[in-house]
């Protein structure tokens, strides 16, 4: 029975209901769909959600602070396009990936400066940069798709651990997930984000460097988007970014921004009401 003074619907946690429904759907799929439970299919199911989950990690922190970034898909597409163009020019993967990550940092920095220094709304800013970054990506690589990446890169992009259904890409995600959980719930930085999201003015009077916090989050979001767009492990299978595994083109899936944003928003609502953002986000 719920405690007196609390509405009855609070007796059941929102994320618990979502988790229960997910279990029911999975059980029905395992029992009614032929081949659903084989290792290859499960690895594809996990791999297809990883790009969204990776981008949603910093995006959730950004949403908690009261801002949004709708340009993540274009940032990922720009990084992928630059990667393909540089590979065509003969550069090595070891050199290209840091360059692409730097591009993501710059994209996030531009968004953050426009929001924190000029005082522009993040929704309007990132809608504009969404179009700008996508246009630049189209200029860089055009409509071409680059597919001749080295075998180790492709193996890590679409491979799985032994004969299991666990893709290699899941391992770095779990590490980043643990870092995000600790950062949000066990550090002053994470607690300050809740304060900023609740009342930016009150947080400023409390001595929190609001603009610096938000700028950091925009940079982290851009960095993660570029990691998703430029590295094979984060685009497992890489067709999540293009249309074929092991290929790079600027045609990043348009709905990725909406998916990662809605995922982050659901995680944020769980974080604000129940203090469990990563668990709630991963189960949605």
Image: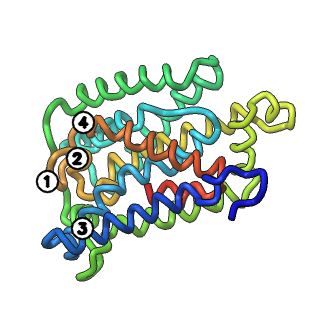
Residue 37, horizontal then vertical, whole percent: 22, 74
Earlier along the polypeptide chain: callout 3 or callout 2? 3
Q: Nearer the viewer, mark 2 or mark 1?
A: 1
Q: In front here: 51 or 269?
A: 269
Earlier along the polypeptide chain: callout 3 or callout 4? 3
Residue beneath label 1, please? 148
Identity of the residue drawn at 54% across and 39% down: 219
Decide: is 144 above or below 29.
above
Residue beneath label 3, please? 29
Earlier along the polypeptide chain: callout 1 or callout 4? 1
SS of the residue under disc 1: loop
Residue 99 visible somewhere in the drawing: no
What numbered label is drawn on residue 250?
A: 4
SS of the residue under disc 4: loop
Report, in whole angstroms, how far the alpha carbon at label 2 lies from the one at label 1.
Answer: 9 Å
SS of the residue under disc 3: helix
Residue 258, horizontal then vertical, whole percent: 38, 37
Q: Give the crowd class for mark 1: few <14, some 14-19, many >=20 residues within 10 Å.
A: few
Quadrant housing residue 130: top left
Report, in whole angstroms, how far the alpha carbon at label 3 lies from the one at label 1.
Answer: 36 Å
SS of the residue under disc 2: helix
Decide: is 271 above or below 256.
below
Identity of the residue drawn at 78% across and 56% down: 4
Residue beneath label 2, please? 87
Earlier along the polypeptide chain: callout 4 or callout 2? 2
Decide: is 68 above or below 241.
above
Q: In front here: 135 or 82?
A: 135
Q: Quadrant of the N terminus?
A: bottom right
Earlier along the polypeptide chain: callout 3 or callout 1? 3
Residue 127, horizontal then vertical, whole percent: 42, 23
């Amino acid at each position: 029975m719920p405690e007196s003074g609390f509405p009855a619907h609070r007796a059941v946690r929102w994320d618990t209901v979502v988790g229960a429904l997910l279990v029911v759907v999975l059980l029905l799929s395992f029992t009614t769909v032929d081949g659903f439970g084989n290792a290859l299919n499960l690895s594809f199911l996990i791999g297809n959600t990883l790009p969204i989950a990776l981008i949603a990690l910093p995006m959730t922190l950004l949403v908690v602070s009261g801002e949004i970034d709708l340009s993540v898909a274009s940032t990922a597409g720009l990084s992928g396009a630059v990667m393909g163009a540089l590979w065509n020019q003969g550069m090595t993967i070891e050199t290209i990936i840091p360059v692409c990550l730097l591009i993501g940092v710059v994209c996030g920095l531009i968004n953050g400066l426009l929001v924190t220094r000029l005082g522009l709304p993040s929704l309007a800013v990132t809608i504009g940069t969404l179009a700008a970054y996508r246009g630049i990506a189209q200029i860089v690589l055009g409509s071409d798709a680059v597919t001749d990446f080295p075998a180790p890169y492709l193996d890590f992009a679409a491979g799985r651990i032994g004969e299991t259904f666990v893709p290699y890409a899941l391992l770095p995600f779990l590490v980043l997930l643990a870092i995000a959980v600790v950062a949000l719930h066990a550090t002053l930085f994470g607690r300050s984000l809740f304060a900023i999201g609740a009342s930016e003015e009150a947080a400023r009077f409390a001595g929190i460097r609001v603009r610096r916090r938000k700028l950091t989050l925009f940079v982290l979001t851009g960095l993660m988007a570029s990691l998703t767009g430029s590295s094979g492990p984060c685009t497992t299978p890489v067709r999540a970014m293009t249309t074929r595994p092991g290929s790079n083109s600027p045609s990043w899936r348009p709905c990725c921004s909406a998916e990662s944003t809605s995922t982050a928003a659901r995680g944020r609502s769980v974080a604000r009401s129940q203090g469990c953002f990563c668990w709630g986000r991963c189960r949605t």
